[in-house]
Image (cartoon, rainbow, N blue to C red):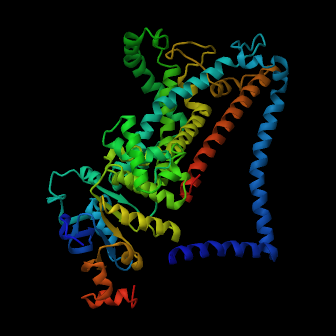
Amino acid sequence: MAQTSIILQTKRVNAYFGKVHAIQDVSLEFRSNTVTAMIGPSGCGKSTFIRTLNRMHEEVPGARVEGEVLLDGSNIYQPGVDPVSIRRRIGMVFQKANPFPSLSIFDNVAAGLKLAGFQRRTVLQEVVERSLRQAALWDEVKDKLKAPGTSLSGGQQQRLCIARALAVSPPVLLMDEPTSALDPISTAKIEELVMELKNEVTIVIVTHNMQQAARISDHTAFFLMGEMVECDLTSRIFTKPRDSRTENYITGRFG
Amino acid sequence: MGAQELEQSSLLIPEVKSRKKRRDVHAGDRRFFWTLRAVALLILAVLIAIAVQLFLVSLPAIRHFGVGFVFSTDWNPVRNRFGAAAFVYGTVVSSVLAIAIAFPISLGVALFLNELAPRRLASAVGFLVEMLAAIPSVVYGLWGLFVVAPWLRTVFEPMMIRYFGFIPLFQGPPYGVGMFTAGVVLAIMITPTISAISREIFRAVPLSHREAALALGATRWETIRLGVLNSSRLGILGAVILGLGRALGETMAVTMVIGNRKDIALSLFAPAQTMASLLANEYAEASDDLHLSALATVGFLLFLVSFLINSLARFLVWRVESRQKEGAPR
């Protein structure tokens, strides 16, 4: 595929929970309109790592981050940068679908826009429809936008959360094991969605499903015990990885 | 996946066990089971017995005055005329006043302790707030009478009358003791209840709701509003109603500061009377049968109202907690 510009880049990122050194010196590059998968055994730090990309990691009491994360060339950890403004530009979808339980489908999708100060009903309607279409959910919910978000099925709720994240048009979308709580059909829908969405947004996805990484990602980074072992084109990682630990993992010798 | 399966199977095991136990019981198990059941039923029996007894004693007054009992403000033991409207009014208004004062404070305390305060400070302050509930109500009454009432009479009430005197609620002389003082003292007494339960409700809000708001770029306040308050509205209502239940029935402190006037006055600064304080004041002196019966009717009314209010609150809190634990669609 054609080389595109680097939109997000980490330079020697270290993350800590209190005294526990969870992530060690991770330097990675994410190119525009690609899908990058983070794989590795449970507890290897892949989820912690993507939470450093939108400054969510520091919300955990006692957690801190060292190193640089460059979004469009500027360090999001620079003193004076408001984490709120970063999170508006880097969307996130979690392992378990988490629509706001007291809000309708419409209001869930519009929540981010309202936070950003958009009030006009027509604008909201337009963006909500666009986002729900992007998340391949529009046809299923267009007649019940006022129903509570939690009335949907698990897979639909997860797509609702994707729509909610997309509504503010973030250039980057982080997905933290978005399908691990879903059935195979819902999973397939989300995977399909990810591949379509990369035309508009750069995706970083954590998964402990190696087949999923192989199916949907352009690049794959392998994490082990808080270290990024290697990152390469997905096709290369799964055929001839350079590091023996990667090979052991993808061939199922551990993890 | 593996973890989920494990959880499911460990959920199943106790159920299977208990069913087995019930089928081939040992004699000891059976005795234990019946003893516990008897104890539990005893509590229920006491509740029903109190309700029935109150009703029976109040029957003569109910027959004599009918529904008018609740609407008449005439309470005259000398002439054997009894109407409870002034006390119902006093109970409702003093409790609502207490809620109006205590609700914002309690919510603020709960949010601060749960969402903002560092952990050590939170547990210290939380402990102190909950200790407020352990102070005997007669002590509150004394404090209300000797500290709050004089301050209200000399400082707060004259100020309100001066600047807001055009509102009927704030007219008339500042008595010190009266409806407003009762409301203030009650508010302090129910704050620990409301804030403790609100804290529990906030704690039951899953972290994922907060993260959802944070990840959308919500500020701290927006995260609280969107991720915490939004999910706990019903539970907070339950907490408020539970506080209301406490305020409705509070007797000693109210009796000491409300001024005990058997009349409805529009001004909040005027003395008043509640159902509970009436009972405390008059039970010892009531000798006439109809008087006693009328007092019992007031007691029955109070019992009924408190019971309903508390049931409603428990139901709301229970519904919120069970729904959030499942984390499933409604």
Relative to residue B67, is residue A240 depicted above or below? Answer: below
- Picture mark count: 0
Q: Is residue A88 left or right of residue A70?
A: right
Q: Quadrant of residue B86?
A: top right
Relative to residue A40, is residue A169 depicted above or below? Answer: above
Along the viewing direction, whichever of A35 and B311 lies nearer the viewer: A35
Relative to residue B87, is residue A55 depicted above or below? Answer: below
Q: Residue at x 61, y 41 (%)?
A: B313
Q: Please identify the residue farthest to the front as the structure is shown.
A: A2
Q: Residue at x 40, y 12 (%)?
A: B164
Q: Quadrant of residue A194?
A: bottom left
Along the viewing direction, whichever of B252 and A95 lies nearer the viewer: A95
Q: Residue at x 72, y 22 (%)?
A: B285
Query: Could one spot residue B125 in this view of the protein?
Result: no
Q: Residue at x 26, y 69 (%)?
A: A16
Relative to residue B180, is residue A136 depicted above or below? Answer: below
Rendering coords of residue A94 (x, y %) = 40, 62
Q: Is residue A25 left or right of residue B236?
A: left
Rendering coords of residue B279 (x, y %) = 68, 26
Q: Quadrant of residue B299?
A: top right
Rendering coords of residue A124 (x, y %) = 38, 40
Along the viewing direction, whichever of B23 and B38 lies nearer the viewer: B23
Rendering coords of residue B309 (x, y %) = 64, 36
Query: Could one spot residue B118 in this view of the protein?
Result: yes
